[in-house]
Image (spheres, grey):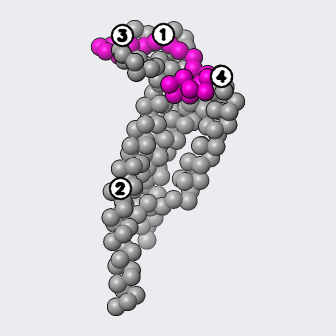
Amino acid sequence: MRKVIRQTTAYRWIGLAVACVVFGVDRTFKVLTNEGRLHGKFGPLQLIPLHNTGAMGGSFAHATLLLGLIGVVVICGLLVMFVRYRPRATRTLYGVAWGFLFGAAVGNTYGRIVNGYVTDMFHFPGDHGIFNFADVSLQLGIVLLLIHVFLGQPKAVDERREQEERKSG
């Protein structure tokens, strides 16, 4: 029984750990950028401080209140997902994906509510915009969650088939 309990909660601890690391790294980059201690060029990556009152790519500029409310709703949704959803397959992958999403959502929402803007700083040459660590973490979390969904589907379908066969057999 203890092994089952550990297996069902380990992915949650992993998710919480990843969320804390993502939030911590994101806040560190933003604080150092706002203090003027993080700037320059590292290979193709340029560090350019920008206070973004909008969303990714500059959309919804100056909609700080709306974006802050959306951030709070997303955080609440992720908390509900954390409590209610129990993955049957690829649990660790799900925990990592959830951690990236939650840590990034909290990081950007925190900055938006406390400062009235999100600090962006990373820029690659060309027309790629300026972004922050939380933006990268959100995108990575979405990709990992999609991989979890696709890898988890066959097992769920197989389990349903087995249950149907047991009922009919």
Sooner in the amino-acid sequence: mark 4 or mark 1 = 1
Residue 37 is tagged as: 1
Q: Dot 3 corresponds to which residue? A: 41
Looking at this rendering, what residue extends furthest in the bottom direction? 169
Sooner in the amino-acid sequence: mark 4 or mark 2 = 4
Sooner in the amino-acid sequence: mark 2 or mark 3 = 3
Q: How far apart are labels 2 and 3 at the CA level?
A: 38 Å
Does residue 25 appear anywhere in the picture?
Answer: no
Amino acid tagged 1: Arg
User: Between residues 60 and 15, which one lies in front from this camera angle?
Assistant: 60
Q: How far apart are labels 3 and 4 at the CA level?
A: 29 Å
Start-end of magenta stretch: 42-61
Sooner in the amino-acid sequence: mark 1 or mark 2 = 1
Q: Nearer the viewer, mark 3 or mark 4?
A: 4
Does residue 60 appear anywhere in the picture?
Answer: yes
How far from the left and from the top, in percent, is residue 57? 50, 25
Name the quadrant containing residue 34: top right
Residue drawn 46% across and 19% down? 130
Label 1 sits on a secondary structure element that is loop
167, above or below 124, in the image: below
Asked if the stretch drawn in magenta spans residue 53, the answer is: yes
Residue drawn 35% across and 14% down? 125
Q: Dot 2 corresponds to which residue? A: 150
User: Between residues 16 and 153, which one lies in front from this camera angle?
Assistant: 153
How far from the left and from the top, in percent, is residue 54? 59, 25
Q: Which of marks 2 and 3 is in front?
A: 2
